[in-house]
Image (tube, rainbow, N blue to C red):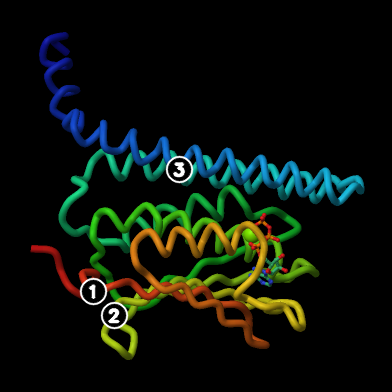
Amino acid sequence: MDAALAQSQHTLQMPPTDLVAEANHRIANSLTLLVSMIRMQAVAVKKADESLSSAQVRQLLDGVAARINTISQLHRILSHTGSEGAVSLKPHLEEVTHALVAALSSPEQAVRVVHTGGDCIVLMRQIQPIILILCEAFINAMKHAHPAGVPLVITVDCSPAADGRLALSISDDGVGLPEGFDPAGGGMGFKVMRSLAGEIGADLEIESTHFGLTFRLRLPAGAMAGAKLA
Ligand SMILES: Nc1ncnc2c1ncn2[C@@H]1O[C@H](COP(=O)(O)OP(=O)(O)OP(=O)(O)O)[C@@H](O)[C@H]1O
Ligand SMILES: [Mg+2]
C-alpha cells in the first residue's frame, strides 16, 4: 500500500488530540488511585505479619493485573468518546467483564458472567467510576464469594430502580458478608467504591443475603435505562 495512503488512514483512525488529552488526564488519576491501593495493600500485608500462601500471593497479583488492565481498557474507551454527552454502557460492561474473567478465573475458581436487563445510557463522565467499581466488585467476588472454590456466577444488571433512577447491580452467588460484618465499614475496596460513587453523585448499596452479595449503584438523573442513543 502507498505509504502516504497508509499514513492518512492511520491518521483518520486516530482520536482527536483533545480527547486523548482528556483521557490521559483521567487515566493519570486512576493510576494514582491504583498506586495508593497497592501501597495500602503492602502496608496491610506488613501489618498482618504472617507469610502469605502462594494462592494468596497469586490472588494479590491477579488483582493488580486486573485493575491495570481495566484502566488500560478505560483509556481506550475514553480516548474515543467525548467527555460530554451520553454513551451506551452495555458494550463496555461486556468488554470489561470479559477481560476481568480472563484475568481472574483459574482452575481453582471458575467464573461465569451473566448480563441481564436492557442497555443503559450513562453520561460520559460517569463511565470511569462505574467501570472501576465494577472491577472492585469482580475482584471481591473472586476473592471472597466462594472460599471453597465452587464455580462462581456473577450477574451484571442494568435496570430502572423503583424511583426511576438507573441502577447497575453486580451480584454474586456466594456466601455473602461474614456474620456481623458492617457493610458501612469494610476494607480499602469498599472505601474506594464508595468514594468513586460519591464522585458521580451515585448511591452505593451493599446487600448481603444467603444467596450472595450485591453491589447496587443508583445513578443520579441523567443516566437512563433502556433508552437508545440518537
Ligand atoms: N463478594 C463478597 N462475598 C463475600 N464477602 C465479601 C465480598 N466482598 C467483600 N466481602 C467481605 O467484605 C470485606 C471488605 O471488602 P473490601 O473489598 O473492602 O476489602 P478486601 O477485599 O478484604 O481487601 P482489598 O479490597 O483492600 O483488597 C472483605 O474482607 C470480605 O470479608
Ligand atoms: Mg476488595
Q: Quadrant of the N terminus?
A: top left
Instruction: Give the amino acid at mark 2.
Output: Arg
Q: SS for tag 3?
A: helix
Q: Is residue 208 above or below residue 73?
A: below
Residue at point 18%, 73% (across, down):
227
Instruction: Give the amino acid at mark 3.
Output: Ser
Residue at point 23%, 41% (across, down):
80
The location of residue 18, given as percent across then percent down, is: 18, 32
Query: What is the distance, in whole Å, between disc 1 and disc 3 at their CAs?
Result: 24 Å
Say which residue label 2 marks: 165
Say which residue label 1 marks: 221
Quadrant housing residue 8: top left
9 relative to 188 in the view: left or right: left
Query: What is the distance, in whole Å, between disc 3 and disc 2 at their CAs?
Result: 26 Å
12 relative to 80 in the view: left or right: left
Quadrant housing residue 101: bottom right
The location of residue 196, given as percent across then percent down, is: 44, 58
Say which residue label 3 marks: 30
Q: Residue furthest right?
A: 50
212 relative to 68 in the view: left or right: right
The location of residue 30, given as percent across then percent down, is: 45, 43
Alpha-carbon neighbours of circle 1 within 10 Å: few (<14), some, or many (≥20)? few
Q: SS for tag 1?
A: loop
Q: Foreground: 117 or 61?
A: 61
Residue at point 49%, 71% (across, down):
170
Q: Are marks 1 and 3 in contact (CB under 8 Å)?
A: no
